[in-house]
Amino acid sequence: MASVSGGDGGTGRRRSVPAAATKPASRVRMPAAQRREQLISIARQIFAERGFDATSIEEVAARAKVSKPVVYEHFGGKEGLYAVVVDREVTALLDRITTALTAGHPRELLEQAAMALLGYIEEDASGFRVLVRESPLLSATGNFSSVLNDVAHQVEHILGAEFKSRGYDPKLAELYSQALVGMVALTGRWWLEVRKPRKETVAAHLVNLAWNGLSHLEAKPGMITVRSR
């Protein structure tokens, strides 16, 4: 307790008041690196909910309980913040797909690619929404199309070798890889909203169509990867 002079009827007596009342508590500042991660996380969620155009620096700052200049200091503006968020999602999805492609059989590789994408959608829906939302600022190397192109190039190499061994024109591998990856990606966007059937079933049917074609569809397709465990 601290003693201070008080007006208690002119008696001249001193009264005691809590020390905290005479000295305001100091504010704890978040370290710059931690603040940056906080802003990225908040912005990622808002971009997923509303897209680029409907997101504002004001809302990002408000949710983070900081002033707008703090956001500008870290990212330079909404465009810079958006670029960081998208780049992280692109890297995360590509890493997931690349890591999943371990099997040697082409059908298993298709299964693994489909499961990797559907797994990302299931476990990280906000990140996927950020990637698939259109933005006028996205370049050829910073959007969902760029991710699909990277994946398609990997599939192209696999198909090229398969085509060559079967006497098909390996130059067509690029066309088929784009078709296959596009089919999985569009189905993934649809599944993002409906979430049924379960991802293993979706992947099995995608591979069924891609591998067997419409004329030889299996009535109840399963996955080689699952059956071989």
Image (tube, rainbow, N blue to C red):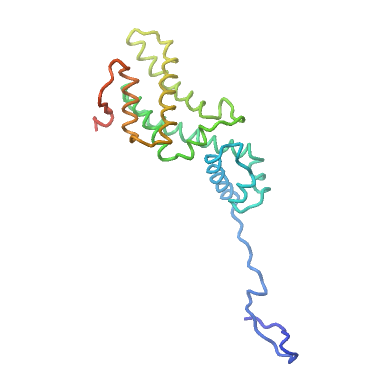
Q: Residue at horizontal 34%, vertical 27%?
A: 111
Q: In this view, does 150 lie to the left or right of 212?
A: right
Q: In this view, does 197 lie to the left or right of 47?
A: left
The image quadrant of residue 51 is top right
Q: In this view, does 36 lie above or below 53?
A: below
Q: Residue at horizontal 41%, vertical 40%?
A: 123
Q: Where is residue 215 in the image (x, y as percent from the top left)?
A: 29, 15
Q: Is residue 170 above or below residue 139?
A: above
- Which quadrant of the rendered structure holds the C terminus? top left
As drawn, the residue found furthest toward the right would be 10
The residue lying toward the viewer, choosing from 144 and 97, is 144
The image quadrant of residue 219 is top left
The residue lying toward the viewer, choosing from 190 and 181, is 190
Q: In this view, does 1 lie above or below 49?
A: below
Q: Is residue 40 left or right of residue 122?
A: right
As drawn, the residue found furthest toward the bottom would be 11
- Which quadrant of the rendered structure holds the N terminus? bottom right
Q: Position of residue 132 (x, y in %)?
A: 51, 32
Q: Residue at horizontal 36%, vertical 10%?
A: 164
Q: Where is residue 121 in the image (x, y as percent from the top left)?
A: 42, 36
Q: Residue at horizontal 61%, vertical 47%?
A: 59
